[in-house]
Image (spheres, grey):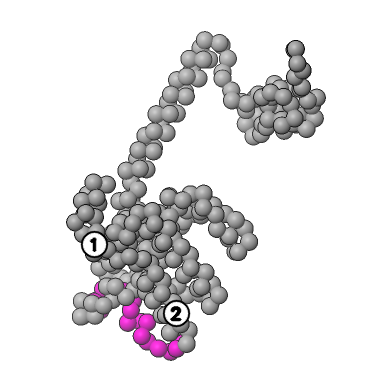
Amino acid sequence: MKLLDRLERKFGRYAIPQLIVYIVGINGLVYMLRYGMPQSDAISKMWLYPHMVLKGEVWRLFTWIFIPPSASLLWIFFILYFYYMVGIGLEREWGSFRFNVYYFTGMAATVLAAFVVGEGTTAIYLNLSLFLAFASLYPDFEILLFFILPVKVKYLAWINWGFIALTVVTAPLAGKAAALVSVANFFMFFGRDIVSSAKNRGSALQRRRSFAAKLEKGTGRKKTMHTCTICGITEDDDPVMEFRYCSTCEGHYEYCMKHLKDHAHIQKTLGV
């Protein structure tokens, strides 16, 4: 990103190092305030309400990011730790300046959407955009779902994309706007890579199809990737069949699941 490079050279010294540490820390303090003083109306003065901002309560333009999600005391610890882990991971990958730009761009887009629709919102979609960026950079990173089941973040990212799409389709106008702008910073950072990757996949697929067509034309049969050594079945004969190589047979001999464990192992001998 040439523009970001220029901006970083000019304004990089003004970046806030470990920005996510301050955000998570204040979220924790606000949660303890709400937990210890449930009758207090202090948190209500932090929400992003455009009409209140226009009345002079300009601090609401920033304080809404410090309102923690509603959760039990145990869960809030893991939620805030997850925010911290994601934010630190992004900052280590990008540097402080670019992480600041990503976060503040998401903030600005959310505030703008709130004023356009005339309703406030929370930081849930902004935090979701952080997770989507993290999953794009570290797709195979594993977390323990429910503290037990290891799951790669790329699969959780697809679930979150589905959640955003569902929100856009079914939610009221304020929800639609918040969901849409939540990914504005994501596409600003990853849009070019997504388009480039899609073009490369399309070109590769076209080349494979062209090669397969030429091979089929020359041999009179369609090229397959998997063939069972015993019965000769291919993925075209049974699309759901799985194929494996035998670790005991000497050589690259592939078998369908029906014959993987039920075949005479092939052993090469010297002089043969």
- Residue type beneath disc 2: Tyr
Residue 248's label in the rendered image is none
Q: Is residue 102 left or right of residue 213?
A: left
Q: At x 41% / y 61%, what residue is drawn?
A: 88
The correct choice, above or below, for 238 with respect to 100 in the image is: above
Classify 10 Å Cα crowding around label 1: few (below 14), some (14-19), many (20 and above): few
What x and y, as percent, mark residue 233?
68, 24
Residue tagged by mark 1? 13
Quarter residue 238 falls in: top right
Query: Taking 141 as reference, is 59 above or below it?
Result: below
Q: Is residue 159 above or below residue 271?
A: below
Which amino acid does the dot numbered 1 rest on?
Arg
* Residue situated furthest front in the rendering: 270
| Residue 68: x %, y % from top left | 42, 74
Q: Where is residue 261 in the image (x, y as percent from the top left)?
A: 78, 32
Q: Mark 2 points at which residue?
A: 31
| SS for callout 1 | helix
Q: Which of 140 and 68 is in front in this view?
A: 140
